[in-house]
Image (cartoon, coloured by chain):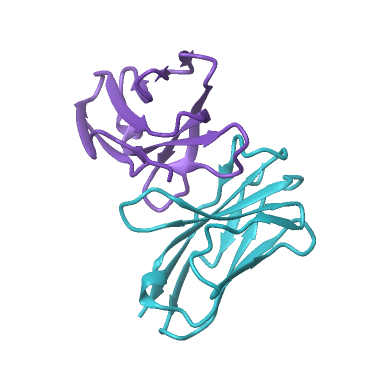
Chain colours: A cyan, B purple
């Protein structure tokens, strides 16, 4: 079946531009997670949704980062006024249940801020 | 804060040999552990998981060992194949957690 998909796969933005990254989770998956992965590092948690509710956004690095999942399926991660330090791969994961277990990851969006 | 670390950043093994990848964690409240495999340009792929009430779990060609006393986790891959070449991450979460804490990763290279 279809896995988690993300778009675009690659995004180049000039410093100061706003970007929007999309995640399509596996159909029916209740939980959705966003991670940021810097080059050569493990993913770092950004935020977590249970259906449309954003239950944890403690990992968002600044108020320039905003995530939403208005209908409990597709999610968008928005970064305003991008900075060079925002360059990373942004990973989305979903899981069937309410808990964090067995997350299925998408391929990620590689964001490069020039 | 959370700290999940790996002992070796790179590992090279001959095809057919067994591989052992190690991981240390610092949070004694960690309850659930996962090993992920990440190939270049792809997202992490689930390999095997283990809960804190177990010390060993086996899958197809993989075994995870958990030593809660020293907060150590290992992944053993039997008869390593070229397709096993990737970066391997351990990740953990406490019982009431809603996020995973990932280690830095170990890059495994299988030499044909």
Q: Nearer the viewer, residue B45 or A65?
A: A65
Q: Nearer the viewer, residue B96 or B112?
A: B96
Return the x and y of residue B40 as percentages of the image width and height.
36, 49
In-image side of A50 versus A84 (left or right): right
Return the x and y of residue A59 as percentages of the image width and height.
52, 58
Q: Nearer the viewer, residue A49 or B18?
A: A49
Find residue A87 and report its image quarter.
Answer: bottom left
Is A17 drawn above or below residue B86 in the view shown? below
Image quadrant containing the N terminus of chain A: top right
Residue pushed farthest right?
A: A71
Find residue A85 and report its image quarter.
Answer: bottom left
| Residue sitting at x 54%, y 67% | A8
Image quadrant containing the C terminus of chain A: bottom left
In-image side of A103 versus A74 (left or right): left
Q: Nearer the viewer, residue A53 or A90?
A: A53
| Residue sitting at x 34%, y 21% | B70
Is B10 drawn above or below residue A10 in the view shown? above
Find residue A65 and report its image quarter.
Answer: bottom right
In-image side of B31 versus A13 (left or right): right
| Residue sitting at x 60%, y 52% | A33
Return the x and y of residue A83 as percentages of the image width and height.
41, 78
Return the x and y of residue A14 as percentages of the image width and height.
41, 84
Is B23 drawn above or below residue A38 in the view shown? above
């Amino acid at each position: 079946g279809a896995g988690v998909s993300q778009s675009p796969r690659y995004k180049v933005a000039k410093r100061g531009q706003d970007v929007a990254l999309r995640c399509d989770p596996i159909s029916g998956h209740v939980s959705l997670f966003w991670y940021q992965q810097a080059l050569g590092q493990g993913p770092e948690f950004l935020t977590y949704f249970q259906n449309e509710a954003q239950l944890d956004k403690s990992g968002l690095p600044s108020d320039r980062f905003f995530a939403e999942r208005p209908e409990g399926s597709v999610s968008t991660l928005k970064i305003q006024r991008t900075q060079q330090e925002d360059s990373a791969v942004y990973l989305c994961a979903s899981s069937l249940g309410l808990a964090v277990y067995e997350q299925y990851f998408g391929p990620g969006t590689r964001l490069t801020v020039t | 804060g959370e700290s999940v670390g790996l002992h070796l950043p790179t590992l090279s093994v001959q095809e057919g040999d067994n591989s052992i990848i190690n991981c240390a964690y610092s949070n004694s409240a960690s309850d659930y552990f996962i090993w992920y495999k990440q190939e270049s340009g792809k997202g992490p792929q689930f390999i095997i998981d283990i809960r804190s009430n177990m010390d060993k779990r086996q899958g197809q060609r993989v075994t995870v060992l958990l030593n809660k006393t020293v907060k150590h986790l290992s992944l053993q891959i039997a008869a390593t194949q070229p397709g096993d070449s990737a970066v391997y991450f351990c990740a953990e979460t406490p019982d009431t957690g809603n996020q995973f804490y990932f280690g830095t990763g170990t890059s495994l290279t299988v030499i044909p």
